[in-house]
Image: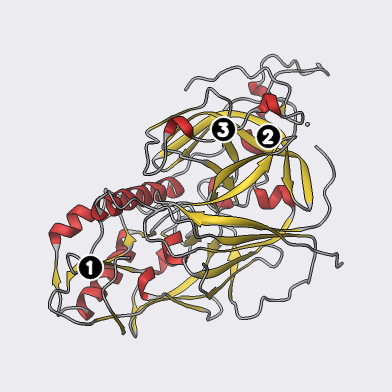
């Protein structure tokens, strides 16, 4: 039990600009990550309700996605990672010749990277705290000498649209050798948000290295997307795949739902490097691919095997079908930086939340706050100088355990003396069904952890750290 003082802590425009590419040496790239904060002027429960709604909507999207259309010397590149009030963490990337710097939300649950593109870019419902939709930074293809539209017969077009994409290129005859038709427009859904545009190949520049012919989306129209997306999923179009990353890692600074200027670093590493050596101090569990997924999009997620959930010393009994994907591919746990709060399907959430209710029976439930915030259970702790809250732990395959710091799974409001569990489910917002991953480990629960995606050795590593 932890004792803690109170804290609150579409239509498309024609792009006629000629949009080009070079070899890549092994390198490790460090990028800084930052959380998107919330303004003090907004009521905290409305902020929490917005994030709960977006986390559940994100979970629905991840669970019901539409199918897509020898040692070498390694070096490190850094980029800052910042948190934001709308729930994401952004890195800055440089595209084009000369380079144009733009912020991107770091997302391990999707693969295509895209930027707001051209002066005609439109974003609806993008009036987030500290975000002016009219001033969202955009990429200008006409100012880059290396920008090129992707042709319908370019193999990279099939990364998004599949091997039969040429059947959609009606202006390209099978016998034609000089087809000039562009790759079809893309439309991508992200829970409550979406984006649409055309594919480009561009230079992606880091201080030590430039990657040519990097596939990136030039989005013309978006909804609820205050920045572009940096896709760190497992598909061919992702940053790890295109850059040939051996591993990437990040440390998410603690969020207080405001746009803080404090940042941490994200690290990308290419090349064969140090083989299977583990990073000192990290606990590891294997990744696995969902090979029997009912939806091919599930194969781009980072699945880990969660063996047990513990509330205090109590091992809560989660139905096995939710811990491991079944023959239909549904179930299991994924790690997703694009989700704010960890999501659990209703049967999982119920046994966890009921165990908290049982062990915190001395405190009164506050239904009004639960309705306003979208979180549950919430407890009134008025009159207590200190409170006892059970520890929440996840135990993974191989025995590695993630014992969450208290501030990673409970939120306190110092004015109302109310504390709420910061995990969401369909029994809190909306209705759901058993489809796709059953548990989604979100960024709020990852804060102040050093997180490593060791792609070369197919494992997930973590250690508690102060990330600021």
Looking at the picture, how far across and down is residue 450, in whole percent?
56, 70
The alpha-carbon separation of the residues under discs 3 and 2 comes to 26 Å
Front residue of this view, candidates 377 and 427: 377
Query: Is label 2 in a helix, a strand or a loop?
Result: helix
Could you say which disc has been placed on residue 138 in the image? 3
Q: How many marks?
A: 3
The alpha-carbon separation of the residues under discs 2 and 1 comes to 53 Å
**Residue 140 lies in quadrant:** top right
**Residue 199 lies in quadrant:** top right
Could you say which disc has been placed on residue 462 in the image? none
Bin the neighbour count of mark 1 within 10 Å (Cα to Cα): few under 14, some 14-19, many 20 and up: some
Question: Earlier along the polypeptide chain: callout 2 or callout 1?
Answer: 2
Query: Is label 1 in a helix, a strand or a loop?
Result: loop
Front residue of this view, candidates 82 and 123: 82
| Vertical side of 195 occupied by 415: above or below | below
Could you say which disc has been placed on residue 158 in the image? 2
| Vertical side of 192 occupied by 84: above or below | below
Bin the neighbour count of mark 3 within 10 Å (Cα to Cα): few under 14, some 14-19, many 20 and up: many
Query: Residue under circle 1?
Result: 414
Question: Earlier along the polypeptide chain: callout 3 or callout 2?
Answer: 3
- Viewer-nearest of discs 2 and 1: 1
Asked if marks 2 and 1 touch (Cβ < 8 Å), the reply is no
Looking at the picture, how far across and down is residue 79, in whole percent?
63, 55
Bin the neighbour count of mark 2 within 10 Å (Cα to Cα): few under 14, some 14-19, many 20 and up: some
Looking at the picture, how far across and down is residue 84, in whole percent?
44, 51
At a point 67% along the width and 17% down the height, the residue shown is 16
At a point 20% along the width and 78% down the height, the residue shown is 358
Q: Does residue 441 appear in this view?
A: no
**Residue 75 lies in quadrant:** bottom right
Looking at the picture, how far across and down is residue 403, in whole percent?
43, 78
At a point 54% along the width and 20% down the height, the residue shown is 12
Query: Is label 3 in a helix, a strand or a loop?
Result: loop
């Amino acid at each position: 039990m932890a004792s803690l003082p109170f804290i609150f802590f579409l239509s498309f425009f024609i792009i006629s600009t000629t949009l080009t590419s070079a070899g890549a040496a092994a390198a490790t790239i460090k990028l800084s990550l930052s959380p998107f904060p919330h303004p003090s002027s907004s009521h905290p429960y409305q902020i929490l309700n917005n994030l709960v709604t977006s986390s559940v909507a994100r979970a629905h999207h991840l669970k019901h996605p539409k199918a897509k259309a020898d040692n070498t010397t390694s070096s490190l590149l850094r980029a800052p990672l910042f948190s934001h009030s709308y729930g994401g963490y952004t890195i800055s990337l440089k595209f084009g010749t000369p380079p144009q710097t733009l912020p991107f939300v770091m997302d391990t649950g999707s693969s295509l990277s895209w930027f707001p593109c051209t002066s005609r870019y439109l974003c609806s419902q993008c009036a987030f705290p500290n975000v002016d939709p009219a001033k969202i930074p955009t990429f200008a293809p006409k100012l880059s000498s290396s920008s090129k539209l992707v042709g319908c017969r370019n193999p990279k077009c099939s990364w998004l649209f599949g091997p039969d994409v040429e059947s959609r290129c009606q202006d390209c005859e099978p016998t034609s050798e000089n087809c000039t038709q562009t790759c079809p427009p893309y439309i991508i859904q992200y829970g409550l948000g979406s984006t649409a545009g055309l594919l480009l190949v561009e230079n992606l520049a880091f201080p030590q290295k430039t990657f040519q012919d990097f596939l990136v989306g030039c989005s013309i129209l978006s909804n609820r997307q205050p920045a572009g997306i940096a896709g760190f999923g497992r598909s061919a179009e992702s940053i790890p795949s295109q850059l040939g990353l051996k591993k990437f890692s990040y440390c998410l600074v603690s969020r207080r739902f405001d746009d803080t200027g404090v940042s941490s670093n994200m690290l990308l590493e290419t090349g064969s490097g140090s083989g299977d050596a583990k990073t000192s101090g990290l606990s590891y569990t294997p990744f696995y691919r969902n090979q029997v997924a009912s939806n091919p999009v599930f194969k781009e997620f980072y699945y880990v095997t969660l063996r047990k959930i513990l509330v205090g010393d109590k091992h809560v009994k989660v139905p096995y079908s939710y811990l491991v994907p079944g023959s239909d591919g549904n179930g299991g746990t994924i790690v997703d930086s694009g989700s704010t709060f960890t999501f659990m399907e209703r049967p999982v959430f119920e046994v966890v939340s009921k165990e908290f209710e049982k062990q915190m029976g001395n405190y009164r439930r506050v239904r009004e706050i639960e309705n306003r915030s979208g979180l549950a259970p919430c407890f009134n702790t008025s009159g207590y100088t200190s409170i006892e809250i059970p520890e929440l732990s996840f135990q993974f395959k191989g025995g590695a355990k993630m014992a969450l710091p208290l501030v990673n799974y409970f939120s306190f409001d110092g004015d109302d003396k109310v504390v709420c569990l910061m995990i969401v489910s369909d029994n809190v917002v909306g209705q759901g069904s058993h489809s796709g991953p059953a548990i989604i480990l979100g960024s709020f629960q990852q804060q102040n952890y050093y997180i490593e995606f060791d792609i070369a050795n197919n494992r997930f590593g973590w250690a508690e750290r102060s990330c600021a």
